[in-house]
Amino acid sequence: MQIQCTWPSHEMRLSPSTFLNFSKNFCADFNFIRTRSVSCTPCPSFSAAMSTVPTQNDVVPGQSESTQKTQQSLQVAKRLEKFKTTIFTQMSNLAIKHGAINLGQGFPNFDGPEFVKEAAIQAVKDGKNQYARGYGVPDLNNAIAERFKKDTGLVVDPEKEITVTSGCTEAIAATMLGLINPGDEVILFAPFYDSYEATLSMAGAKVKGITLRPPDFAVPIDELKSTISKNTRAILLNSPHNPTGKMFSRGELNVIASLCIENDVLVFSDEVYDKLAFEMDHISPASLPGMYERTVTMNSLGKTFSLTGWKIGWAVAPPHLSWGVRQAHSFLTFATSTPMQWAAATALRAPDSYYVELKRDYQAKKAILVEGLKSVGFKVYPSSGTYFVVVDHTPFGLENDVAFCEYLIKEVGVVAIPTSVFYLNPEDGKNLVRFTFCKDEGTLRAAVDRMKEKLRR
């Protein structure tokens, strides 16, 4: 005999033993979701109909043999078993379902500059449409080197020290896979961008977390010192910091640098928000004395030019580190979109006035959201960079960040991101949610109005 489970969209036929295994896995997944504070769209009920049906050895009139085969269980490598659908996908899907204003996922709802888009169109028309050189179109590598010198004062070789990747996410993956060995320890500052832990898991690394806590999310220096060991291969940091908006101070970076030099530790520095620094100047760890030789600096085009869908990123590192990054990159994507690379070179040569205007525009958007959130009743923590703001949701009485975000979407019509998914210990983030202000001012005001009208303490 088999057990039949009827879902709204299809039905599954499972043997009793398979059904029991499926049930256990379903419960395990559900418990994972709750303990990791990961929200998802509610599962369809499968209690609608359960009946005994013939096994595949029995003949069922009107059914082919293929329809009687037992459905295969989902398969994933053990190193990725703990990682589910990203929270950004889940919340964006809920936003669409409930017609909510999406202040969750960090992509602009406005387009990038015309001069960059025109450069891409021209590159396509000029026939620049075949595979690019693996580590980047020469003109883009040169533009990155020019920009890096302007920002850090460092002169780098565009041919040996710059690798163009498919977004910063691939730069992160290529760095981890190319420079980390199984068993190496890598230190993360939580909360952190969710791809860090997943990519380190694929590399076989041992993740060591150090939690940054509100209100200022300062680095606990003593804890960092005690966490570094003879097995520590690298420290991964992100400044300006997603999701908190924190910028690592010069004092914090100097301490991190001295610890890395003393213990022969690398730094992987994610700097995609470097042009969205509001309260202080951005400092690249590579620019500190003695640090360039042990630093991989990762960046991208998308955040600065509101072109997140282009996925143009890069890694800057000395030749002995670039070698590992390039080896991994060669077998991940090999090359990145050719016409978009030519356009990216044009973008990076934008005048300084572009960056001044960009910062001014985002400061205005930030003011709208921050003042709005305060007026609604949130405790808003300072954001010195990025286009994110973290708030304490507890004045509204929901049990945790996931419950609050689900309520906010379904009852208020606004999307935020629960931050517990950005921690090794989800409990550390259960009181916090993240909003983004990379939206046009009308959208931000509409979201604030909805919260003022419907959100009750």
Image (spheres, rainbow, N blue to C red):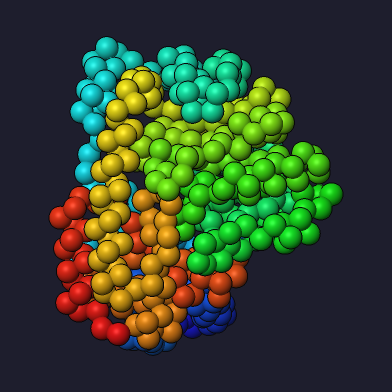
Count of labels in the image: 0
- 284 vs 128: above or below: below
Q: Residue furthest right?
A: 230
Q: In this rendering, is residue 327 above or below 27?
A: above
Which sits in the foreground, 292 or 430? 292
Q: Position of residue 338 (x, y in %)?
A: 38, 22
Residue at x 38%, y 24% (from the top left corner): 348
Q: Residue at x 35, y 61 (%)?
A: 435
Residue pictured at 20% horizontal, 74% vertical: 452
Q: Nearer the viewer, residue 15 or 31?
A: 31
Q: Is residue 284 visible?
A: yes
Left or right of 407 on screen, residue 424: right
Residue 449 in the figure: left or right of residue 366: left
Q: Quadrant of residue 377?
A: bottom left
Q: Position of residue 371 (x, y in %)?
A: 27, 64
Instruction: Pinpoint residue 114: horizontal percent, then vertical percent.
Output: 20, 28
Q: Is residue 381 above or below residue 114?
A: below
Question: Which quadrant of the figure contains the C terminus?
Answer: bottom left
Q: Residue furthest top?
A: 126
Residue occupying the point 16% across, 63% down: 446
Q: What is the x, y in percent for residue 431?
A: 46, 75
Asked whether residue 76 appears in the rendered view, the answer is no
